[in-house]
Image: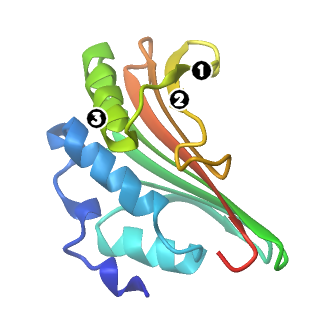
Amino acid sequence: MLAAFSASSLLGLGSAPEMDEDRLMAVFFQLHDAPPDPDGVEKMLEENGYVRVSSIVGDRQAIIEYADRKQLLFLIYELESYSSLAINIQSSVSLYETNEKFAEKLGNLMSVRMGFSPAPFEDDAGWQAVAWPGADGSSDVAFSVSHNTEHQVTRIWGHRLLVGDK
C-alpha cells in the first residue's frame, strides 16, 4: 500500500525556498491522503529527505512531526484510534518565509480543488484563516488555509474521520 509513496513522490519535490503554492498543496495532499499507518508515514517522510523533529507513537495515538533540513517546511501527522470504531487523522504542512499573497494564492487553489469558496474561520490568535468544512459533502473531512503575518508562515490543515470499514 505504501508503494505509491516512493522517493520520487511529490513530497521530495524541491526544497522549502523553491516551494510554490501548487507544490505545497501537492505535498499536503500526499500527507493527508496517506494510509492511517504512522510507521508508513514516517518511512515515507524519511525516504523523501525529511528530518524527524518529534515522534510519539503509541497503541492508540501518534503525533509525528518532520521538517526539511532548513526547517522552513514542517509536516505534522496526528492519528487517534478508537479501537475498530473510528480513526481521527489531522495533518498539516506549514511553510515559513511566506506572505499574505502566497496564502491567498494557496486559498484560491484550494477553492478550485474543493469546488466551492471557503468560509471565514476562527483560528488561533494572530492567524488569518479560511476553511472548507465538510469538503467532501459530509462532516468527515475539513480543510483550512491560515497565515500568520508576524511569523511569515502559511499553513494548510486537514482533518479526516475514518469510521468503521472506511
Residue occupying the point 50% across, 79% down: 40
Q: Position of residue 92 (x, y in %)?
A: 50, 46
Say which element carries label 1.
Answer: loop
Mark earlier in primary sequence (1, 2): 1
Q: Position of residue 101 (x, y in %)?
A: 26, 16
Colour scheme: rainbow
Say which element carries label 2.
Answer: strand
In the displayed structure, does residue 121 sit left or right of residue 84?
Answer: left
- Vertical relation: 164 (above or below) 70: below
Category of crowding for the residue at label 2, using alpha-carbon neighbours closer than 10 angstroms: few (below 14), some (14–19), many (at least 20): many
Q: Disc 1 vs disc 2: Cβ atoms closer than 8 Å?
A: yes
- Vertical relation: 81 (above or below) 110: below
Residue occupying the point 53% across, 43% down: 135
What amino acid type should be assigned to the residue bearing mark 3?
Leu
Residue occupying the point 59% across, 73% down: 36
How many marks are shown on the rendered structure?
3
| Residue at numbered disc 3 | 109
| Residue at numbered disc 2 | 131
In the displayed structure, does residue 141 sit left or right of residue 66?
Answer: right
Compute the Cα span from label 1 to label 3: 17 Å
Asked which quadrant contains residue 18, the reply is top left
Compute the Cα span from label 3 to label 2: 13 Å
